Image (cartoon, coloured by chain):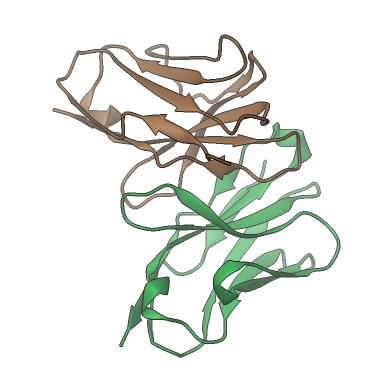
Amino acid sequence: AQSVTQLDSQVPVFEEAPVELRCNYSSSVSVYLFWYVQYPNQGLQLLLKYLSGSTLVKGINGFEAEFNKSQTSFHLRKPSVHISDTAEYFCAVGANNQGGKLIFGQGTELSVKP
Amino acid sequence: DTGVSQDPRHKITKRGQNVTFRCDPISEHNRLYWYRQTLGQGPEFLTYFQNEAQLEKSRLLSDRFSAERPKGSFSTLEIQRTEQGDSAMYLCASSRPLPETQYFGPGTRLLVL
């Protein structure tokens, strides 16, 4: 079975600073990975995904993530954050042998301060 | 592209009542998923459909929960004899066949008093 660990429950950062949100996963089979963002009282919006191919993936709003198979990580990064990036971020893993369901981490609350 | 829609957005009910939620997926998506999200947690998988067939149910889905997708389009999730522990956000998502992205609806927030 797959599992996901988001290593930081809260990340406070000042506006225009860089940020990294950490995600580690465990799996015995090939996986695909996602980062979603959730604003208060809303559903999840896809930021980026890794299905195969290039390990560096770029997403919306200037976010990017790197798939590292040896370290089983998929950390999310942004070089300069904005106040509007304040939200909850979820890492999720899927695999063909688990029928398409996604396993989510517990989330990281990103708080951008002026 | 109208996205995934869910109805209602909010539901307040008394313990013991039945509730039903509806999800309309993106039209060309044959897969439909239900997740539950409690406060401060990530979404947890409940069940999913490929077309009208329900292919997997989580053990979180007790016998008080039932989901249907009768014509392979919209889906309903019913909770019978609600309990306070059922209070959560219920999220629906849809996708094309694997390994495609799941697109989420806005969710239905349930409060059981």
Q: Colour of chain A?
A: green
Q: Which chain is brown?
A: B
Viewer-proximal residue among B58 and A20:
A20
For the C terminus of chain B, the quadrant is: top left
Left or right for A92, reference B11: right
User: Split into 4 quadrants, where in the image is the N terminus of chain B?
Assistant: top right
What percent of the width, then of the height, locates residue A18?
51, 87
Which residue corresponds to the image point at 56% horizontal and 9% vertical from the top-left?
B70
Q: Nearer the viewer, residue B27 or A100?
A: B27
Residue B111 location, quadrant: top left
| Residue A104 shows in the view | yes
The total number of labels drawn is 0
Q: Give me the residue at 63% from left, 56% from top.
A: A34
Residue B62 lies, in percent from the top left, at 42, 17
Q: Position of residue B82 (x, y in %)?
A: 25, 18
Q: Quadrant of residue A9?
A: bottom left
Between B2 and A39, the one nearer to me in the picture: B2
Q: Is residue A27 above or below residue B91?
A: below
Query: Is residue A92 left or right of A90 when viewed as pictured?
Result: right
Q: Hey, which quadrant is residue B100 in on the image?
A: top right
Task: Tell me if residue A29 comes above or below residue B92 in the rendering.
Answer: below
The residue depicted at 59 percent of the width and 28 percent of the height is B32
Residue A11 place in picture, x, y as percent: 40, 76
**Lateral position of residue A14 relative to residue A93, left or right:** left
Q: Is residue A22 in view?
A: no
Q: Residue at x 65, y 28 (%)?
A: B31
